[in-house]
Image (cartoon, grey):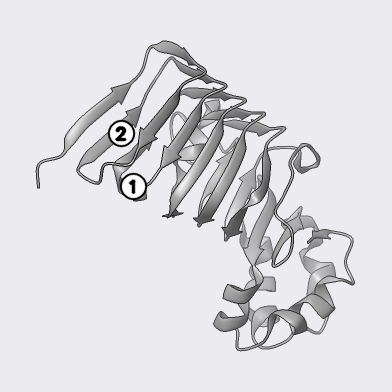
Amino acid sequence: MIFNKVFYEDRRIENERLELTDKGSLYFLGSKLTLSHCTLVLKVPARNLFIEGVRFIDCTFEVKQELKNHQQWVYASLKGCRFKGNLSGCDFGHWPDYSTGAENGSIEDCDFSEARLDGCRFMGCDPRTLRFPKWPCFTILNPIQNASELRRATWPGSFGEVTVQGLDQQPRSTAAVTLFAPAMARRHETTPDALRAVIEQFDCIVY
């Protein structure tokens, strides 16, 4: 398949709606691009979306097709943005160890309250500036520092021995990780209610 390549770079775009929805296109949001007060409609797989060196200011992302395993957000600066829709396995923020160019990534004052996140990480940021999605999503703050405390709890199914045991293996800049309780329950042979009963015991978990 021959893809149509669409480039946005080296300019400032304000108050526009960008529809990144053509499955036959590769979208490149490139260097020296600033998007301010824009709405971006995303309906392509992660492999069709390339982000590097972009500043997003007060933008809204409407994710119409679940965006899976898209780490390139760490190449972008996100300030005051809002996310809607389903995202899984995505990383945001400042993670210079990830790759060249990731030293420019950042996230602050962003709102994920209308998104469904699963396995999404927030790197090198202050999670207090972010609004995370509510239950059935839940967010573990500072997972590496809180791993030992969380391991002392009795978790249902295999959640404790798999997910909780692995928290301190996260990259050292991990500030928060958000999970989706129904997906975790299926994966670890338990129920969302059983997970929540333990989650409620911890101040370091937002739900």
Among the 4 quarters of the image, the one containing residue 148: bottom right
Decide which of 147, 192 is in the foreground and name it.
Answer: 192
Say above or below: 203 vs 200. Answer: above
Say above or below: 11 vs 68. Answer: above
Three-letter amino acid code at disc 2?
Tyr
Among the 4 quarters of the image, the one containing residue 69: bottom left
- The residue shown at (52%, 25%) is 38
Say above or below: 60 vs 16. Answer: below
Image location of residue 59, percent across then percent down? 57, 28
- The residue shown at (72%, 50%) is 132
Is any part of residue 3 visible from this angle?
yes
Is any part of residue 97 visible from this angle?
no
Q: Is residue 183 left or right of residue 80?
A: left
Three-letter amino acid code at disc 1?
Val
Which mark, by number, is residue 27? Answer: 2
Q: How would you rate the neighbour count of disc 1 (Cα within 10 Å): few for under 14, some for 14-19, many for 20 or more? A: many
Q: Residue furthest left?
A: 1
Distance from label 2 to label 1 (Cα)? 9 Å
Q: Is residue 148 left or right of residue 68?
A: right
- The residue shown at (36%, 17%) is 9
SS class, disc 2:
strand
Image location of residue 159, percent across then percent down? 66, 80
Q: In this view, does 62 lie to the left or right of 153?
A: left
- The residue shown at (70%, 79%) is 192
Decide which of 7, 89 is in the foreground and name it.
Answer: 7
Decide which of 138, 126 is in the foreground and name it.
Answer: 138
Which residue is labeled 1 in the image? 44
Q: Do the residues labelled 2 and 1 touch (CB within 8 Å)?
A: yes
